[in-house]
Amino acid sequence: MSIIRNNWTREEVTEIFNTPVLDLIYQAATVHREHNDAQEVQVCTLLSVKTGGCPEDCSYCPQAARYQTDVEVHKLLPTTEVLQRALEAKEAGSTRFCMGAAWREVRDNRDFDRVLDMVKGVNSLGLEVCCTLGMLTEEQAQKLKDAGLYAYNHNLDTSEDHYEEIISTRTYDDRLNTLENVRKADISVCSGGIIGLGEKEEDRIGMLLTLANLPEHPESVPVNALVPVEGTPLEEQPRVSVWEMVRMIATARILMPKAMVRLSAGRVRMNMEEQALCFMAGANSIFAGDKLLTTPNPDVVEDKEMFQTLNLKPREAFKGAAAEKYEAIS
């Protein structure tokens, strides 16, 4: 059986990444079956609880206040509405509910107190509750943990070398420090990135190397294909091919055998056959629902048909090691 490592070299990752694609899929599928149930896919729902008006300058993001996009700005949603959406997600088959707020960082104010109440409420529904709120201090991470937060998403986005080409309003170390604060609070880390940002192949390899050599592998690794949005600096970027996504997913699976590798943004542009290739290559998690924060996503009916055709089954909430975490916060 493949061993869990956190000491990969760039040369090793480059060799894996550049393996002929059908061989790479086979290797990744083998690793996947050693460590996971290959027919099982986690279904997650992502809700934007506070949209737009963000002071950051992430080149891909329509929620940045400085870009002229069609995103409608709205303040933090009422807690009752969020809990209703979480319940609907659960009834539609999701087992993880993630709440996103377009903040640069969490501030200790009434809005954060309301988010803590949302976390408590979603946790009480028996869902794995996740948040993505920007940068966090150790103390804020602990408050989220105490409220029942299961996972925290904070993507690296790209490699350290390419990062300044995409974002100037925070540093790569800021990202890594937030992940460290999340780990210290014993919250599951969800961290991945986006391809199609104009990066080179070595940047994709560099991002995967950073993730795989964290002190602990992220519990969840979202692999996103850029969905270009009019009004953002990256609006003219060409579409990422399915083979590029497969190569990223397969390499992530080999480097991080037990992680949930999530087929995330860009899935709406894939047909069922292309998604099936990604599942074969080791993806075992998707976002469900018609939107990912502000970008389109396949609807629930399409996903149910796909699960039926491919004989996939939704992963239960709090399975395996996750059950121990749930018992600890319940």
Image (tube, rainbow, N blue to C red):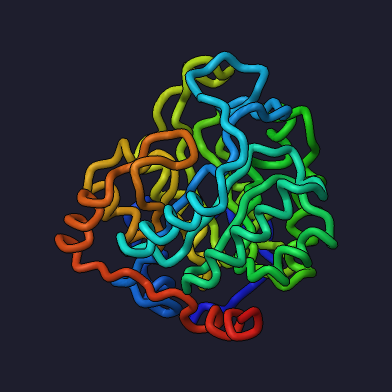
Residue 24 shows in this picture: no
Count every numbered label the image shows and give the total: 0
Q: Is residue 96 left or right of residue 129?
A: left
Taking 195 as reference, is 35 above or below it? below
Q: Quadrant of residue 190?
A: bottom right
Residue 60 visible in the snapshot? yes
Apparent side of residue 147 relative to residue 272 in the rendered image (left or right): right
Q: Nearer the viewer, residue 236 or 55?
A: 55
Q: Nearer the viewer, residue 85 or 37?
A: 85
Q: Taking 306 as reference, is 109 left or right?
A: right
- Location of residue 282 in the rendering, given as x and y in whole percent from the top left corner: 40, 63
Check the image and report above or below for 152 versus 63.
Answer: below
Q: Position of residue 167 (x, y in %)?
A: 71, 30
Please name the residue shown 77% across and 28% down the image: 168
- Give me the residue at 47% from left, 23% from top: 229
> Horizontal and vertical percent for residue 326?
58, 80
> Where is residue 330 shown, x and y percent of the image?
61, 81
Residue found at x 80% / y 47%: 109
Viewer-closest of 144 and 324? 144
| Residue in the image at 51% along x and 68% along y | 128
Closer to the camera in the image, 205 or 66: 66
